[in-house]
Amino acid sequence: QLQFVESGGGLVQPGGSLRLSCGASGFDWALYDVAWFRQAPGKEREGVSCINFGGRTNYADSVKGRFIISRDNNKNSTYLEMNSLKSEDTATYYCAVDKIRFRLRCELAAESYGAWGQGTQVTVSS
């Protein structure tokens, strides 16, 4: 049975940093792309970053140079290091796993992902 555990969200001041973690069990984690999405109140879910099975990464323009995605296949986990946070980064952040294995380049489209974490809230405010 597929299970997710997300953590690391919280309240941070503008310019601060947070590190989100997502662990999962119940499938061959190392074979799938994983991603982070976010959704702010009243807005559509937005792809933030993804990393494919081989470690190739992709970022939304809005977070390039500020966020870093990584994965540890030994721990079935992915991480999102968020730096220089802005108020517009405030949202619920979700990790997700691709529907197919061995995608050569991960995508930031929600329809590509078939399993989702429960979400963790990130609030950037002074």
Image (tube, rainbow, N blue to C red):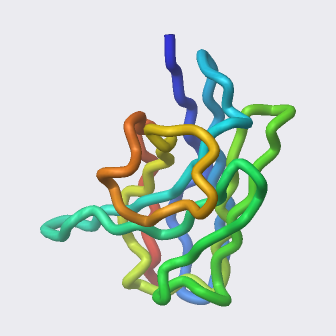
- Percent coordinates x, y for residue 19 in the rendering: 68, 60
Is residue 114 found left or right of 102 in the rendered image? left
Q: Between 118 and 49, which is closer to the camera in this rendering?
A: 49
Say if 15 sits above or below 8 in the image: below
Indicate the position of residue 70 as horizontal and vertical percent values: 75, 58
| Image coords of residue 1 (percent x, y) | 50, 10
Label total for image = 0
Residue depicted at 42% across the width and 55% down the height: 121
Name the residue nearer the viewer: 7 or 96: 96
Q: Is residue 49 above or below residue 1?
A: below
How far across and down, in percent of the image, does residue 23 sit? 65, 34
Most extreme residue toward the left, as rendered?
42
Q: Residue at x 40, y 45 (%)?
A: 113
Q: Quadrant of residue 77?
A: top right
Q: Residue at left 80%, top 38%?
A: 73
Q: Is residue 64 left or right of residue 38?
A: right
Judged from this view, the residue extending furthest toward the right is 74
